[in-house]
Amino acid sequence: MSATIDDVQAYWNRRPCNIRHSTAEIGSRQYFDDVEERKYFVEPHIPGFAQFERWRGKRVLEVGCGIGTDAVNFARAGADYTAVELSEVSMALAKQRFEVFGLKGNFIHCNAEELSQHVDNGAFDLVYSFGVIHHAPHPNQIVREMRKVVAPGGELKLMVYAKNSWKDAMIEAGFDQPEAQNGCPIAFTYTPEEAAVLTSGFTITELRQDHIFPYIVEKYIRYEYEPQPWFKAMPEGMFEAVEKRFGWHMLITAKPA
Ligand SMILES: C[S@@+](CC[C@H](N)C(=O)[O-])C[C@H]1O[C@@H](n2cnc3c(N)ncnc32)[C@H](O)[C@@H]1O
């Protein structure tokens, strides 16, 4: 039997994304600062992709904000920020994070497959979604909904998992799993051709791959960052070249067609 939206919601409620990025008291200022530091240390390509500063004074909709790391950066940059999120446990932490830092944002608990019923249509300068829709039962439906809510002349920024990637090869060979916690009910992957179909209704202006997680997991969970010996042995520049060709994150920027 295939996984349902309830399975997806239960999974992300059990362990919100990046919840263990800090050992400080969950919900404290220190906790959120640690989470941000670790997230952008491990995924340093995110700020360059999101371009937080570009959205000052613009309406930004984030689909699947998780515990709100990118969220606070859009808000700090001066965006008029709205999030939708399926996991109420994650969303509660994102809301608390905004309170801790005195930021303004709107948070809506819903399934993004029904996005246009919950937010203004044709209203958002940016629809942003990082690592979310490939976990839903119907990602194409979410993109159709995104198309309804993006403003004319607006932009879509989407990260989905890449099929032609080091990580996918390791998952297939039994060396890895898609998420930190096992049992992720859904994690679709895409080729560039499949991504073009996924984003129909939009015209892709940029599509690239990035991100290989290089660290020894047993050390990483103890907050130590030692690369696997095969990555450590690579000459400078080689790891980045492999990331660009075989990265797990497919970073898509698109305009409404
Ligand atoms: C891997 S986490 C990414 C969270 C955040 N974007 C980040 O980068 O930290 C995936 C998130 O997508 C959310 N999600 C999955 N399916 C969803 C759906 N159909 N509607 C809204 N959110 C969804 C999950 O609840 C989870 O918080």
Image (cartoon, helix red, strand yellow):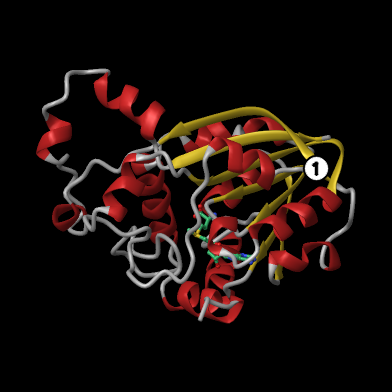
123 left or right of 134?
right
Q: Quadrant of the C terminus?
A: top right
> Taking 72 as reference, is 35 left or right?
left
Seen from the viewer's position, the closer of residues 116 and 197 is 197
The kind of secondary structure element at disc 1 is loop
**Residue 124 in the image, given as x and y percentages of width and height:** 82, 46
Residue at 36% across, 53% down: 34
Amino acid at dot 1: Gly
Taking the image in four quarters, ligand 1 sits in the one at bottom right
Residue at horizontal 58 percent and vertical 30 percent from the top: 207
The verdict on label 1 being within 8 Å of ligand 1 is: no
Residue 11, above or below 125? below
Residue 152 against residue 21 in the figure, above or below: above
Indicate the quadrant where residue 18 lies. Answer: bottom left
Question: Residue at coordinates 30% horizontally, 54% vertically from top-left?
Answer: 172
Relative to 109, is 35 above or below? Answer: above
Q: Position of residue 212 (x, y in %)?
A: 33, 39
Picture quadrant of residue 54: top right
Badge 1 density bin: few <14, some 14–19, many ≥20, Cα 10 Å: some
**Which residue does the numbered mark 1 point to in the structure image?**
201
Q: Nearer the viewer, residue 11 or 29?
A: 11
- Residue 26 in the image: above or below residue 132: below
User: Residue at image x 59%, y 69%?
Assistant: 91
Q: Tell me which corner region of the image, top left, top right, bottom left or bottom right, holds residue 154.
A: top right
Residue 117 in picture, x, y percent from top left: 85, 68
Q: Position of residue 164 (x, y in %)?
A: 41, 39
Residue situated in front as seen by the camera: 68 or 155: 155
Classify residue 74 as left or right of residue 135: right
Between residues 32 and 196, which one lies in front from this camera angle? 196
Q: Is residue 105 visible?
A: no
The answer to whether any part of residue 255 appears in the image is yes
